[in-house]
């Protein structure tokens, strides 16, 4: 399974689910240890040049857990927990949230927004990462 997020007409960006699962498990590990998740997510995502996704994933995981009304459960190795499978499913098709995870308001609306924001940020990040480089570093301030 690979997540396809539309970046340009006819050209989907790809993010392997293993990356998403790794971020979810990193977030849960930090929470269990009582430390902020964003710095750990940033370190994990640095190798992929996607550090901008750290606050996005922190928010998505927090709001998913809030919608669940309990701590997020993670799997081990290649075995995904039901929570991880649901998170991946929601990112693939956010319209399924009301059926897959019915919850009281405002939890449902907040999670819907987090799902859509996460999808948008993944798309923008992957689009940026896919741009050809000219060999010359361009400043964001130029």
Image (cartoon, rainbow, N blue to C red):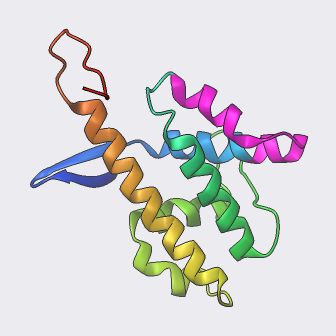
- In the depicted structure, whether residue 88 falls above or below residue 98: above
Instruction: Tell me, yes or no, whether the highlighted magenta stretch contains residue 54.
Output: no
Q: Which residue lies furthest to the top in this view?
A: 135
In the image, 129 versus 97, the foreground residue is: 129
30 with respect to 40 (left or right): right
- In the depicted structure, whether residue 83 falls above or below residue 126: below
- In the depicted structure, whether residue 85 falls above or below residue 100: above
Residue 37, percent across and down? 73, 42
Residue drawn at x 19%, y 18% as measured from the top left:
133
Residue drawn at x 64%, y 50% as measured from the top left:
58
107 with respect to 135 (left or right): right
Residue 84, percent across and down? 62, 58
Picture quadrant where residue 117 is located: bottom left
Q: What stretch is highlighted in magenta?
A: 28-46
101 with respect to 26 (left or right): left
Q: How many marks?
A: 0
Picture quadrant where residue 83 is located: bottom right
Picture quadrant where residue 26 is located: top right
Instruction: Tell me, yes or no, whether the highlighted magenta stretch contains residue 40.
Output: yes
Query: Is residue 2 visible in this depiction of the protein?
Result: no
Residue 56, percent across and down? 54, 51
Magenta-highlighted stretch: main secondary structure? helix
Residue drawn at x 89%, y 40% as measured from the top left:
33
- In the depicted structure, whether residue 60 falls above or below residue 140: below
Query: Is residue 108 visible in this depiction of the protein?
Result: yes
In the image, 117 versus 28, the foreground residue is: 117
Residue drawn at x 25%, y 19% as measured from the top left:
138
Q: In which quarter of the image is the C terminus?
A: top left
């Amino acid at each position: 399974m690979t997540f396809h997020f539309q970046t340009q007409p006819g050209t989907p960006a790809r993010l392997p689910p293993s990356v998403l699962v790794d971020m979810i498990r990193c977030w849960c590990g930090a929470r269990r240890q009582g430390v902020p998740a964003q710095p750990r997510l940033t370190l994990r995502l640095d190798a992929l040049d996607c550090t901008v996704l750290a606050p996005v994933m922190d928010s998505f995981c927090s709001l998913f857990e809030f919608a669940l009304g309990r701590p997020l459960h993670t799997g081990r190795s290649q075995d995904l927990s039901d929570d991880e499978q649901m998170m991946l499913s929601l990112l693939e098709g956010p319209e399924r949230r009301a059926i897959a995870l019915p919850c009281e308001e405002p939890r449902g609306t907040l999670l819907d927004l987090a799902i859509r924001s996460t999808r948008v940020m993944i798309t923008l990040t992957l689009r940026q990462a896919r741009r050809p480089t000219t060999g010359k570093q361009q400043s964001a301030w130029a």
